[in-house]
Image: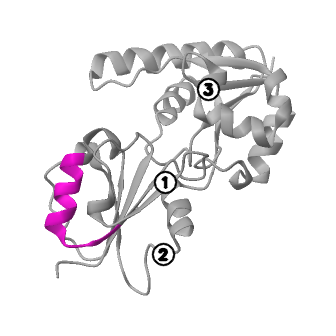
């Protein structure tokens, strides 16, 4: 019996109109859709996708519990369990569409699961989505890089105290939980800063300059820092 294919599908940053035609087609054509979380319909990825593909609500929805933790053993265990769960569907010949925010190649937990599934001999495929930082740059009307500039993408929560002193521009992702320390990094850098919170969603907020950024910024907060010390 032919086994199914696991698709890691990026649904973009928040605006359902930014989903790709391929993402929409794969959701429509396949009956099993997996989403990271314990309650599928409460997840952000599902809420984005169902606006573009209403029939998603009638699919076989598979919650994949992937707790946010820095405990390496807990992470490994959750990734192993997720892979085993999805392989059960693939072994039955069913394709599985796994929804991920933004693009599945950018800091996506899904990739840990895909590596395991692929190592066990199943076919997998990544489907690009619009990244949060590209959407945020477009939303604020700024470029990420021009001419020969470099772009540095950092997971801010893991780089607290980091000197933003490389040439070029920075994207700071995963900033929300440690925003006070991130703001201090930005002040020291002297860079021009814009932050988009909940890009493309109803709760979207845009802040210009470090002083505008609130200390209680949400999890989906992305910062673009340009220029250098003044």
Residue 225 within the magenta-colored segment of the rendering: no
Mark 2 Cα-neighbour bin, 10 Å: few <14, some 14–19, many ≥20: few
Q: How is the image coloured?
A: one colour
Of residues 126 and 34, the one nearer the viewer is 34
Residue 45: x %, y % from top left = 62, 35
Residue 62: x %, y % from top left = 67, 17
Give the quadrant of residue 215: top left
Q: Residue at x 76, y 27 (%)?
A: 95
Q: Give the Cα distance between marks 3 and 1.
A: 26 Å
Instruction: Return the mark for residue 142.
Output: 2
Residue under pointer 1 = 205
Instruction: Return the mark for residue 35.
Output: 3
Majority secondary structure of the magenta segment?
Answer: helix
In the rendered image of this protein, does residue 147 appear above or below residue 171?
below
* Foreground: disc 1 or disc 2: 1
Report the magenta residues as a range. Answer: 180-193
Q: Residue at x 71, y 50 (%)?
A: 19
Residue 179: x %, y % from top left = 27, 46
Task: Answer with left or right where residue 49 lies relative to residue 110.
Answer: right
Quadrant assignment for the C terminus: bottom left
Task: Answer with left or right where residue 22 lies relative to residue 69.
Answer: right
Give the quadrant of residue 97: top right
Q: Dot 3: what SS?
A: strand
Mark 3 Cα-neighbour bin, 10 Å: few <14, some 14–19, many ≥20: many
């Amino acid at each position: 019996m032919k086994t199914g294919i696991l698709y890691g599908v990026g649904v973009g940053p928040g605006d359902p109109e930014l989903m790709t035609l391929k993402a929409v087609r794969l959701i429509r054509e396949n009956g099993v859709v997996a989403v990271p979380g314990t309650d599928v319909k409460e997840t952000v990825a599902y809420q984005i996708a169902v606006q573009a593909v209403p029939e998603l609500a009638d699919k076989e929805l598979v919650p994949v519990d992937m707790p946010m933790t820095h405990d390496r053993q807990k992470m490994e265990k959750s990734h192993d369990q997720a892979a085993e769960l999805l392989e059960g569907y693939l072994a039955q010949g069913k394709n599985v569409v796994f929804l991920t925010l933004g693009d599945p190649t950018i800091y996506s937990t899904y990739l840990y699961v895909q590596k395991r599934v692929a190592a066990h001999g199943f076919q997998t495929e990544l489907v690009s989505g619009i990244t949060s930082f590209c959407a945020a740059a477009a939303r604020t009307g700024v470029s990420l890089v021009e001419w020969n500039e470099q772009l540095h993408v950092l997971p801010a929560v893991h780089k607290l105290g980091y000197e933003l002193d490389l040439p070029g521009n920075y994207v700071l992702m995963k900033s929300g939980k440690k925003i006070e320390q991130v703001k201090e990094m930005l002040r020291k850098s002297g860079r021009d800063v814009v932050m988009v919170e909940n890009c493309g969603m109803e709760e979207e907020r845009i802040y210009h300059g470090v002083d505008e950024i609130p200390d209680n910024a949400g999890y989906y907060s992305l910062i673009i820092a340009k220029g250098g010390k003044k």
